[in-house]
Image (cartoon, rainbow, N blue to C red):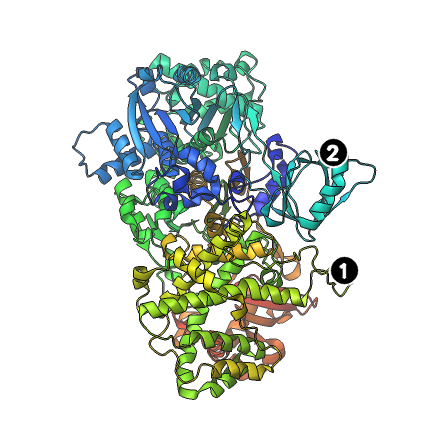
Amino acid sequence: TNQEMNLHDSILILVVLSGLLSFVSSRGWGIEALRSSDATTNFGRLQQPLSLMRGGAEDDNDEERYSRQVYTLGARAHGMVRSSTVYVDGPSESGLLYECVKNLALSGVGKIVLVTSDDTVDSAYHSTEMDDLGRTYISGARAELGLSDDEAVSSDSIFVEFLRRLNPSLDVDTVARSELQDMSGGPSDILLCVDRPYTTQVSLNEVSRKSSFSFVAVETAGVYGRTFCDFGNCFEIHDIDGETPLTVPLERVERIDGEEKKIKVRCISGEKHDVSRGDVVSFLLEGGEALDVPCKVVQVHNPELVSVELDANEEEVDDIIARLNEAGRSFSRIKQLQEVSFVPLQEAVNDQTGSLFTPCDLDKSFDESRRMGIFDSFQALSVFVKEKGRLPRKADWTKFFGMVKGPTASKEAGKEWKGHCKQFMKTCAGKFTPIQAIFGAVAAQECLKAASGLYNPIRQFLIYDCDEVLPSTKKKQTEDTCSSGLEYILGTKVMDAVKNQNLFVVGAGAIGCEILKNLAAMDAGTGSKGSIIVTDMDTIEKSNLSRQLLFRDMDIGKFKSQAAKEAVGRLNDAVKIECHTSKVGDSEESTPFDDKFWSKRVSVVMNALDNVEARLFMDGQCVANEKPLVDAGTLGSKGNVQVVVPHQSEAYGSSADPPEPAIPVCTLKNFPYQISHTIQWGRDMFDGLFVRRPKQANQYSPLYAELGSEKVAERLESELGETAAIDAAKELRQDLAQPNGNDKTSLKEASIAWAIELANELFYDVTKKLLAQHPEDSLDEDGERFWSGARKTPKLIWYSSENESDGQQSVVNENYADFVRYAARLRLEGLVEDPASVGECLITKEEAIEALKKFNLSDSDGGREDESPQVQIRSHLEALGDDVWSERPQNVAEFEKDDDSNGHIAFITAASNLRAMCYGIAPADAMETRRIAGKIVPAMITTTALVSALSCIEMVKVVQDLPLQRYRNAFINLALPFFAFTAPLPAEELPGLRGSTYTMWDRLTVKEGKKTAEKGGITVRQFLRRLKKKACDDPDELDISTVTFGEFMIYANFLNEDDDDLLDKKLWEVVQGALESAAEFDKNFSRDGGDGSKAMNVEAAKFLDFTVAVEDLESGEEVELPPVRVVKS
């Protein structure tokens, strides 16, 4: 997943909690279904672009900026967010406040209003000196605004200007708290209260109730945090989980014996539904028409079969069954509007049943003494500050505890409850950056829920802590010596350790930016021995700006790692940060991440990657070099964090996610039944027409001119085989044909003609031939109807201006015109000298329609299937004659999904929709096409911020070298909301020699030695002899069976035991020879024609790792040794 996630812990957590947490019954993890309900339900309803949806109020780049978020929220919810106003009441020096508004601003809320106040109790409730994150944000804002240290500017002004720089389209204002009393809010207005005492929270909650604002309160203290939500007496949730309901292909329906209105609904074999009992479902018929009969699921038999009750008269049931079996294409569940009620804060505080607390930790949330101890301590904190005018110090325990007057305090306080109160008091004066980032994400997400009605809100309290990060013992120190919140909470020893870590942040995208910001606030890499190294090979695009806070519009086009380094320098100029643009895992290029780098310059690796391949590489490097790894990933509202602890936990690669199911070729080619099939077909068509074919033309054009048609035909047959050679010859006949002229006008006319012929072939001829081969009433080899189940009968479609009043034909015409228009344009761009110049003569829709009207279907070439393959190949090539295209190489397109001006997505959308309409599948809009064709991973800043904060908590634990049970892998879903934390699994123990065990972290090390190195290096014989001594107390009782380096076998006793030539060779020489032989083989026999330069330079390596299998001669047992590392002298 996008950024993609390891599902090992997720699956375990879901199994454990499925019967435990009632809110999980809302089922699902992901993307808003209303996106699909806004999309086409018939051929005539295509979703409007985002800019039109909002009445044209957006600037032209708004859709691109928020594109990844729109795929998470959906267009309806995103539009509500864009029109929302959030009033923020909190100290403008608060890091939590900055986190909240940063997430809101990047999410695209319409307006943020800072509520100002001069209340002394409010001021005493927050300590700027102990708020590392707040000071970091202010430092960065001042640097970005060009303010010197001695320029006095109010924190409110800096805050406002920071927001305007962060999102130029955001409307920012300020208002006095007293003015809120007279305001009236709308459905998308929210009042967010940040780091304020309880009395202020209650007062603002009352104002929000009176003024019809939704209300969110959030605060942190030390390693503890609390959120409260009140969205009024009747809040409407449009979509409780955000999951897009599956469109389930329908095989057939049948009546249930003895039941008047109930039918059984069966999916196509291999497809699974996602419905539950009580769900309302809708059936989609051929052509995209919905069955106008309410249907409710009454029983789920298995993943492919459900029973449904029809809200229809008994006499209508048979007609409905017949209609569904004849024209039914699919069914899907329909999201139902839900109404929930909230109670005011003062009333919620007095509810001690626990029903108003959202669980957020499997171990902690159900511990009542912990929950109430933290809750009561937050209440006491407000009382203490009001009475003393300051935050409590560690010596204030007796006074503080005397103010803890929660319900539990009136009874005999248990030791555990009291212990939680005491722990809270010791850390509450300081602010812990990761906790602030976590609650900034949670609070911002709740504001978005209030604005949009999307996702299940917190009802009504959420409490979270990470007290397992606190040191077990801490050297006593006076509070006056603490220079930061982190030092106050964790102590000087841990603080110094964080400062002196060498942190390798892999990726400077959304997660990477958040991690770097947190690290800057935590002073990581500021010590004499510390540093931060960041690498990312990508450059900044417009769509990155809604999730990546370190970048601004002016940074578009820069390398992410370079821009991130500059931004971190503004946040904290004491951080020593080094940036690279190298790709990790790239063996073809020299990178700075060599053996010396891994052994000397890395303390902890923090992954911020977006693909599994790179994650697995980094995981392998961390295991090989015994380095801790913290990996994070997101997918829309879902996030995952996994920590890998050397010699304690399993690795990232210890468990593998199941591969994504591939669409069978036969389904793509002839039998699509879902829109994803036709979109993938359109994407493949783009590559075939505008990437592969120009390359093919450029390859064979000079050969044709030199050798002639006969030799080229022979070459095609030998290289491709008969069937593929026929297709290639047919393509070359079109692609090498010399147009009547080389001017743009002539090329444009030729391109339009080519596009129309292509449309005729793809959407008329191919369908006509398929139906001729398999008529509608034909049977398969088993005697069953051929066109049944997943095989849907296609129909012929073509452009027709005679019946444009027909809604379906109108959409067919629209897509035909678009197909011809954009196919011709892309063809023309391939033929002209400068593709950018095509803009001067773009093909208009009117030109495409006029050309389509003139086209005669009977003009289509029926083909030469009755002739032999050899004759067909030669006929196509000979038709070219002597005058073939040789003006210049044809231009190859490079697919770009985010640039609407290039016509790439427009072409794929039209091609996909035409094919979909051939098979009775409802077409998709450009937004859905872009998501599937571009393999876009939905993303939003709140999830990114949360997993990044969790990553930093695990980093602090790694620095302290804590026992495994203190670490936490996390799986979160902000939509539900759902938070699950588990300790990492221990490393698996593997069987070794004579009953011993080892883990993936163990290894046997053989050192070459200086004297051996001076003689040219260790030989294979010496290596085997030394390895025996290392592996066994009695080397004579051990026989080494095989030695492999990666995929290459270096030694095998059954082949090489008496091979003195091999045994006396230097080990490095044997490995290098194996690698070079493989590279040479690749060069001579692979399709891509490797250049032989990919072989690793063994001489440059500091060590090599081998896999060795041995036989115990005493027992006859054969086992694999722990990884064997040979270290050069």
Q: What element carries label 2?
A: loop
**Residue 238 drawn at (x, y percent):** 53, 32
In depth, the one of 735 and 351 nearer the eye is 735
Q: Is residue 652 left or right of residue 92?
A: right
Which marked residue is nearer to the observer: mark 1 or mark 2?
2
Q: Name the residue under label 1.
A: 784
**Residue 1096 drawn at (x, y percent):** 43, 71
In depth, the one of 574 and 934 nearer the eye is 934
Q: Is residue 444 left or right of residue 40?
A: left
Q: Residue at x 54, y 48 (%)?
A: 806
The answer to which quarter of the image holds residue 1094 is bottom left
Q: Which residue is drawn at 32% across and 61% down?
A: 841
Q: What element carries label 1?
A: loop
The amino acid sitting under disc 1 is: Glu
Q: Is residue 702 above or below residue 186?
A: below
Image quadrant for the C terminus?
A: bottom left
Q: In this view, does 1023 lie above or below 27?
A: below
The amino acid sitting under disc 2 is: Asn
The answer to whether residue 1120 is seen in the rendering is yes
Q: In this view, does 781 lie to the left or right of 923?
A: right
Q: In this view, does 980 lie above or below 598?
A: above
Residue 313 marker: 2
